[in-house]
Image: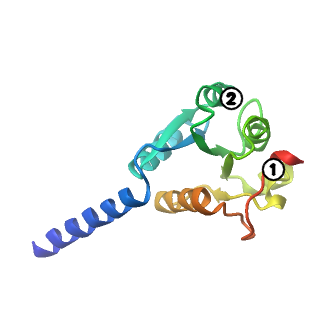
């Protein structure tokens, strides 16, 4: 019984620490994922970590939502393989409107994604599916705080070239 109480206290302390690190609902993430259940789970987890999630099922919806929330969105979290256009193509379009927009890609098909896109050469943050939800939340925090790239160098806008 004492162990349960201690675990609850530790969980409570962890939640409080996360709340201190991430101001609630002040950092917005545009989440673009065409699979509804994956989008819902990712959105729920990131909301629990204090992010405001703006979910979009496809690039057209994402562009519309981006125009509505352009000033508040700090991160585009997008699947690489989407209907209509790829995640990297979507990022290039949005970054023209907001050059300081950060991006992180996700895909279950890394080899296919690399062969179709050049985003990996630029060292843009990427998380392979499936991923642990805790790892996703940590990586989102790292990208927002430190502009992490895969090669450890500062992130630059891939919309430049």
Q: Are marks 1 and 2 in contact (CB under 8 Å)?
A: no
Cα gap from disc 1 to disc 2, whole angstroms = 17 Å
SS at mark 2?
A: helix
SS at mark 1?
A: helix
Q: Give the answer, above or below, for where 152 lies relative to 139.
A: below
Scheme of colours in the image = rainbow
Q: Which residue is mark 2?
A: 63
Residue at x 80%, y 53% (from the top left corner)? 119
The disc, 1 or 2, on the residue closer to the chain's N-terminal end is 2
**As rendered, which of 49 and 145 lies closer to the eye?**
145
Q: Give the answer, above or below, for where 103 lies relative to 73.
A: below
- Residue situated furthest bottom in the rendering: 3
The image position of residue 124, as x and y in percent, is 74, 57
Residue at x 78%, y 35% (from the top left corner)? 93
User: In which quarter of the view is residue 128 placed?
Assistant: bottom right
Q: Which residue is mark 1?
A: 158
113 vs 8, left or right, is right
The image position of residue 17, as x and y in percent, is 35, 64
**As rendered, which of 3 and 54 lies closer to the eye?**
54
The image position of residue 20, as x and y in percent, is 37, 59
């Amino acid at each position: 019984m004492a162990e349960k109480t201690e675990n609850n206290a530790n969980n409570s302390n962890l939640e409080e620490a996360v709340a201190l690190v991430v101001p609630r609902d002040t950092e917005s993430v545009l989440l673009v994922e065409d699979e509804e259940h994956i989008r819902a789970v990712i959105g729920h987890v990131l909301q629990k970590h204090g992010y405001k999630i703006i979910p979009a099922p496809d690039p057209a919806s994402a562009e519309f939502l981006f125009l509505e929330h352009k000033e508040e969105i700090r991160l585009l979290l997008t699947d690489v393989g989407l209907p209509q256009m790829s995640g990297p193509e979507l990022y290039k379009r949005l970054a023209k409107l907001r050059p300081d927009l950060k991006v992180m890609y996700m895909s279950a098909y890394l080899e296919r994604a690399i062969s179709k896109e050049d985003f990996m050469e630029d060292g843009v943050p990427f998380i392979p599916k499936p991923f642990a939800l805790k790892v996703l939340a940590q990586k989102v925090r790292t990208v927002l705080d430190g502009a992490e790239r895969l090669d450890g160098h500062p992130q630059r806008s891939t919309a430049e070239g």
